[in-house]
Image (cartoon, rainbow, N blue to C red):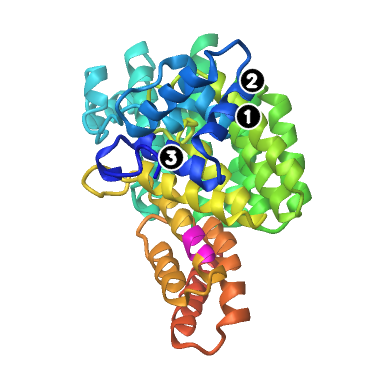
Amino acid sequence: MDEGAADVDNRPGWARRLRAERLGRGWSQADAVRALRAHADRPLPEPSSLMRNWKRWEAGGTEPDSFHKALIAQTFGTVTGAFFPRPHRNDDNTGVLGTAGMDTHELLARLRASDVSPATLEAVRLTADRLCCAYQYMPSARLLAESRAWLQRITGLLDRRLTLSQHQEVLTLAGWVALLTGCVEYDIGQRGRAEATRRAALSLGQESGNADIVGWAYEMRAWYALTQGDLRGAITAAECGENAASGRDVAVQLAAQRAKASARLGDRRQVEQALEQGRSLLERQPHPDNLDNHFVVDPAKFDYYAMDGYRVVGDDRRAGLYADEVIRASSGADGAARHPMRLAEARLTLGVLAARGGDLDSAVAHGLDALGGDRRSLPSLLLVSHELTGLIQGRYAGAAQATTFLAAVDGARAEVVANARG
């Protein structure tokens, strides 16, 4: 038995993952050391010395230094921040406006009084950030109402007398809130409204000269196209976004959308090329200050991107490993969900793998768990649940558990239709 195989639960998460990644590839520790050396861009210690280090790392007794952390992540196709995550800051986003010296009531009073002082604009900026952070957990109906109200208030400032810099700042703030509003509209199935809001966000980004907003507007177009089955359109939108926001962290998510579309086209080579481009760019980005903002690409999200691509191309081993990591990274120490929508897709991934492996009970349990969440992106859930639905209909038609899951999927589809009409 390899060193580190015992007392697995007592080791740090990165040490457990190190062993899981190695075993998942069928590598011995000597194979892993050879792979590490092959990915290095500078001379490494002799194999015997590196082997001793590897054993210590895998046992969890010694943590790699920053150079070896990055090399390990590269060797296993992910980023340092996902393999060796930093502690998550457990903010509840309360009291955000207090840091600007005012509460929401005072801010609204200032806006009604045509006050566009620096303090007012700073409070509006913090409010926009708070809304973007609320995307993961706030019920869709409430978040949509709040984001639409604030979008109207912010765009209303454009009718005031503003300096050039103030005008640009207001355009930027409106762009971010428009992006958020479009995301929530699409989450609940309001396709027409979502596209109109996305176009408005794109225009605001272009007018303000904010490449990040422009990039996210194209990312949303790619997402819309992907979930509607327009795979070539998704790739085109992603490429447009990458051209507009080259080198920025949104380009990582744009590359991920290309990978997802390529996977559904059956092109594994393009999947891996897109993931590597995204991985390389994300590795070069500074660690985000605020991991909760929906429009920040946190390192842990890379495993989420890779999970989708490898599940679709049929690499069950890698898809399962990434799903386990997504679940671990998306759950707090108390078991509460930090990223419920990522968790849902990870559970659907495990459901697909269970169905492929002949375990209908587990497949249905994972699927129902994913569909039953309070905070959901229905188009994304339906995209992934389509794979599980196909497997269940093809292999387990007529089974009671299958009927239960298929009814839940039909319910989600009906909710999208109803919201689209609303």
The amino acid at mark 2 is: Gly
Task: Return the x and y of residue 1 as percentages of the image width and height.
Answer: 39, 45
In the rendered image, the vertical position of residue 382 relative to residue 224, given as above or below? below
* Labels 3 and 2: the sequence-earlier one: 3
Q: Which mark is residue 197?
A: none
Q: Residues within 10 Å of mark 1 (few under 14, many from 20)?
A: many
Q: Main secondary structure of the magenta part?
A: helix
What is the C-alpha distance between the residues marked 3 and 1? 31 Å
Report whether 274 appears left or right of 52: right
Q: Is residue 46 visible?
A: yes
SS category of the residue bearing label 3: helix
Q: Which residue is mark 3?
A: 19
Tell me the kind of residue under disc 1. Ala
Vertical comparison of 333 with 64: above or below: below
> Magenta segment, which residues?
348-353
Q: Which residue is mark 1?
A: 251
Give the residue drawn at x 53%, y 17%: 167
Which quadrant of the structure image shows residue 8?
top left
Which residue does the image show at 52% across and 74% down from the upper left?
358
- Which mark's residue is nearer the viewer, 3 or 1? 3
The answer to whether residue 305 is left or right of residue 267 is left
Percent x, y of residue 37 = 59, 22
Mark 3 is surrounded, within 10 Å at the Cα level, by few (under 14), some (14 to 19) or many (20 or more) other residues, namely many
The image position of residue 236, as x and y in percent, is 77, 41
Nearer to me, 278 or 358: 358
Alpha carbon separation for disc pair 1 and 2:
7 Å
For the residues bearing labels 1 and 2, Cβ distance under 8 angstroms: yes
Residue denoted by label 2: 247
